[in-house]
Amino acid sequence: MGAPYRADHVGSFLRPPELLEARNAAVPDNAHLREIEDRHILRVLARQKELGFEVFTDGELRRRNFMSDLIEAVEGFDLGGAVDRTWKGGVQVAPSSVTG
């Protein structure tokens, strides 16, 4: 008999404060950041297993945001100086702008 319900996850998990702080450090330490990412990815994988998920995701914890892969791979984006926005929860971000 199958499970009485089905649960799937699509998209990003919320990034923990420790990960956000490490990513936003004035001088990021890539080895330290990778260690923090690894630890939290293992935590979200364990939680999904505990909840009975059959398909697992890393929660996209290595991504800065949904656009980071594009912005980091393509030249011509200016990440500063744009109008700031405040997201739910009080997180402020400046949107990127295309410069070339």
Image (spheres, rainbow, N blue to C red):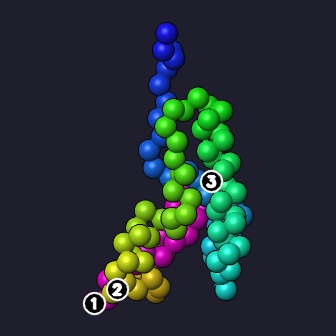
Pointer 1 residue: 100
Q: Are marks 2 and 3 in contact (CB under 8 Å)?
A: no
Q: Amino acid at mark 1?
A: Gly
Q: Amino acid at mark 2?
A: Glu
Question: Residue 6: where, in percent of width, then height?
Answer: 47, 25
Q: What residue is at 64 percent from the left and 62 percent from the top?
A: 37
Single out the residue that lies furthest toward the top: 1
Q: Are marks 2 and 1 in contact (CB under 8 Å)?
A: yes
Q: CA distance from mark 2 to mark 1?
A: 8 Å
Q: What residue is at 64 percent from the left and 68 percent from the top?
A: 34
Q: Which residues are magenta?
A: 85-100
Q: Amino acid at mark 3?
A: Ile
On the rendered structure, is 17 left or right of 58?
A: right
Q: Is residue 20 above or below residue 41?
A: below
Pointer 3 residue: 41
Q: Is residue 25 visible?
A: no
Ranked by sequence position, the earlier of labels 2 and 3 is 3
Considering depth in this image, is 99 or 10 the residue closer to the camera?
Answer: 10
What SS does tag 3 mark?
helix
Q: CA distance from mark 2 to mark 3?
A: 29 Å
Within the magenta stretch, is there residue 58? no
**Which of the numbered marks, if any, corresponds to residue 75?**
2
